[in-house]
Image (cartoon, helix red, strand yellow):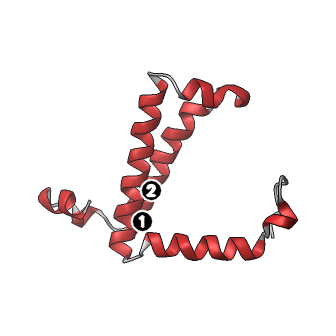
Amino acid sequence: MRAFTDERDWAKFHDPKSLVLALVGEVGELAELFQWLPADRAVQLAAADPLRQRVGEEMADVLAYLVRLADVLDVDLAEATRKKLENSAERFPAAEVHGEAPEKI
């Protein structure tokens, strides 16, 4: 992502605020694809083109902006994710929440 950005001299546009807003916009576009789908058929419907292709494109946009934001802010996403999962495992032990949506704590 950094090389792609540098080749186009776009880094000057990639401040954290702008990247977060772009990320939110792309998440909105992804959400729009599912907005009116019946929840019980969403997986099935998203498995077939043209929706499958569009979902993949929007997910790629979300990932690209997230990776770029992490680069700009010098956040190691892999490490942050590992730590988050470790914390979540402690907060929500499988034996206590198995099969249940935990209440927000």
* Vertical position of residue 50 compared to residue 89: above or below: above
Q: Choose between 53 and 16: the one closer to the eye.
A: 53
* Residue 6 visible at all: yes
* Vertical position of residue 75 compared to residue 27: above or below: below
Could you tell me which residue is drawn at 76 percent across and 74 percent down? Answer: 91
Q: Choose between 97 and 12: the one closer to the eye.
A: 97
Q: Dot 1: few (<14), some (14–19), or many (≥20) neighbours within 10 Å?
A: few
Indicate the amino acid at tag 1: Lys
For the residues labelled 1 and 2, the Cα–Cα distance comes to: 6 Å
Q: Position of residue 43 (x, y in %)?
A: 62, 31
Which mark, by number, is residue 62?
A: none
Q: Position of residue 92 (x, y in %)?
A: 78, 69
Can you say which quadrant of the picture contains the N terminus? bottom left
Q: Secondary structure at mark 1?
A: helix
Q: Choose between 34 and 98: the one closer to the eye.
A: 98
Image quadrant where residue 34 sits? top right
Q: Position of residue 22 (x, y in %)?
A: 41, 53
Extreme residue toward the front, this view: 95
Indicate the amino acid at tag 2: Leu
Could you tell me which residue is drawn at 51 percent across and 74 percent down? Answer: 80
Q: Dot 2: few (<14), some (14–19), or many (≥20) neighbours within 10 Å?
A: few
Are dots 1 and 2 in contact, CB under 8 Å? Answer: yes
Residue at the disc numbered 1: 17
Residue at the disc numbered 2: 21
Judged left or right of residue 18, residue 27 is right
